[in-house]
């Protein structure tokens, strides 16, 4: 067993910084990991504190990562240094002009109900395994909840049996991003799929403790699916169901959330609903702080453009024809 490292002044400052940020409602788990890795790097390099040279060496150790990830790590370090500068005016603060340029994020692949139906059919035909006897049912339910409820992957994985109100058809999402909890009512079809899944899930020998995971991959204990395991299963469904974008790319798991938001917008246009007044409702349903976050998911696709154009023509087409 390795001896515990003695606490240094930098340890104390990092802990104080994290406590302050968390008191403001921020999780800062990733920031803690990055700052601890920076401190470990300083200790291994024999440096007493951070300076320009050691910061550059630390940045160089991340050269295998993408520009956006490297930029994020360097920004985390800089924010910490700015915090230190309030009480230590002469401490080192990295120059952001030397950080990697931000690269555009990969555009999501938006898909619809036809692709989801193919994925559900593929999931139903999967073969159960010794390690995952409920694999077909789990993958089918995962597709349904990701697409119809717009859940984040982590939110789906953290669902327990206690989070399910089967009578009302409501999911309880606990302490998700930004420490927000919310209730997610399900559609009738999703409610029916959940009920069908639980008919298999709530029978021996599967664990039925309220704290046990909804997506169960073993018959004993509380072990649920990991993020990697779920992602690999979903990617397999994408391949088998031939779900691709117009450029040939397969979707990511997070693209379910993009597709959910876009399909909600598309339904409102086709139903002639008040889109602007519905956006705050969508933001609340998706667990966003405001519609600014929701807007990131609302991609302009041909079907959406056509629906919006048809709606405009119904309401104002006569004005254009009259002007002509």
Image: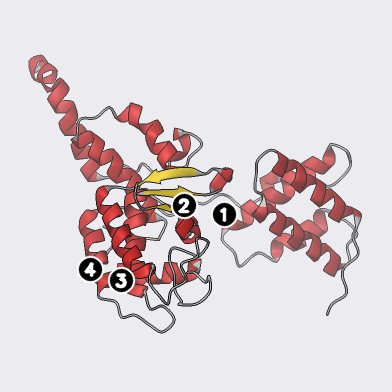
Does residue 318 sit above or below 191 in this rendering? above
**Picture residue at 67% right of the left edge, 50% below the top:** 28
Circle 2/circle 3 CB separation < 8 Å: no
Name the disc covering residue 50, or none: none
Mark 2 Cα shell of 10 Å, populated few (<14), some (14-19), many (≥20): few
**Picture residue at 57% right of the left edge, 54% below the top:** 68
Q: CA distance from mark 2 to mark 4?
A: 31 Å
Counting residues from the N terminus, which is met first, the one under dot 2 or under dot 1? 1
Nearer the observer, 48 or 236: 236
What element does badge 3 sit on? helix
Q: Is residue 245 visible?
A: no
Mark 1 Cα shell of 10 Å, populated few (<14), some (14-19), many (≥20): some
Residue receiving disc 3: 239
Nearer the observer, 185 or 275: 185
Residue receiving disc 4: 121
In percent of width and height, residue 63 lies at: 64, 65
In which quadrant of the rendered view does residue 30 lie? Answer: bottom right
């Amino acid at each position: 067993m390795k001896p515990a490292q003695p606490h240094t002044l930098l340890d104390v400052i990092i802990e104080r910084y994290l406590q302050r940020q968390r008191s403001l409602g921020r999780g800062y788990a990733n920031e803690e990991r990055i700052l601890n890795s920076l401190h470990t790097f300083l200790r291994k390099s024999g440096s007493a504190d951070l300076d320009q040279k050691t910061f550059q060496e630390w940045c160089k150790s991340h050269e295998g990562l993408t520009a956006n990830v490297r930029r994020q790590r360097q920004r985390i370090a800089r924010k910490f240094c700015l915090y230190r500068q309030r009480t230590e005016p002469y401490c080192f603060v990295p120059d952001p002009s030397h950080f990697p340029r931000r690269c555009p994020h990969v555009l999501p692949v938006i898909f619809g109900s036809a692709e989801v139906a193919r994925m559900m059919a593929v999931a139903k035909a999967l073969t159960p395994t010794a390690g995952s006897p409920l694999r077909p049912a789990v993958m089918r339910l995962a597709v349904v909840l990701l697409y119809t409820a717009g859940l984040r992957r982590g939110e789906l994985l953290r669902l327990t049996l206690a989070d399910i109100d089967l009578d009302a058809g409501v999911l309880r999402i606990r302490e998700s991003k930004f420490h927000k909890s919310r209730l997610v009512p399900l559609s009738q079809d999703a409610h029916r799929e959940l009920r069908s899944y639980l008919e298999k899930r709530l029978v021996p020998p599967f664990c039925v403790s309220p704290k046990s995971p909804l997506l169960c991959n073993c018959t004993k204990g509380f072990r649920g699916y990991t993020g990697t395991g779920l992602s690999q299963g979903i990617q397999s469904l994408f391949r088998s169901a031939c779900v691709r974008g117009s450029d040939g790319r397969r979707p990511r798991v997070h693209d379910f959330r993009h597709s959910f938001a876009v399909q909600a917008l598309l339904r409102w246009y086709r139903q002639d609903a008040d889109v602007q007044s519905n956006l705050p409702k969508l933001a609340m349903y998706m667990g966003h702080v405001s519609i600014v976050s929701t807007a990131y998911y609302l991609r302009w696709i041909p079907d959406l453009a056509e629906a919006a154009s048809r709606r405009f023509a119904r309401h104002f087409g006569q004005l254009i024809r009259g002007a002509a």
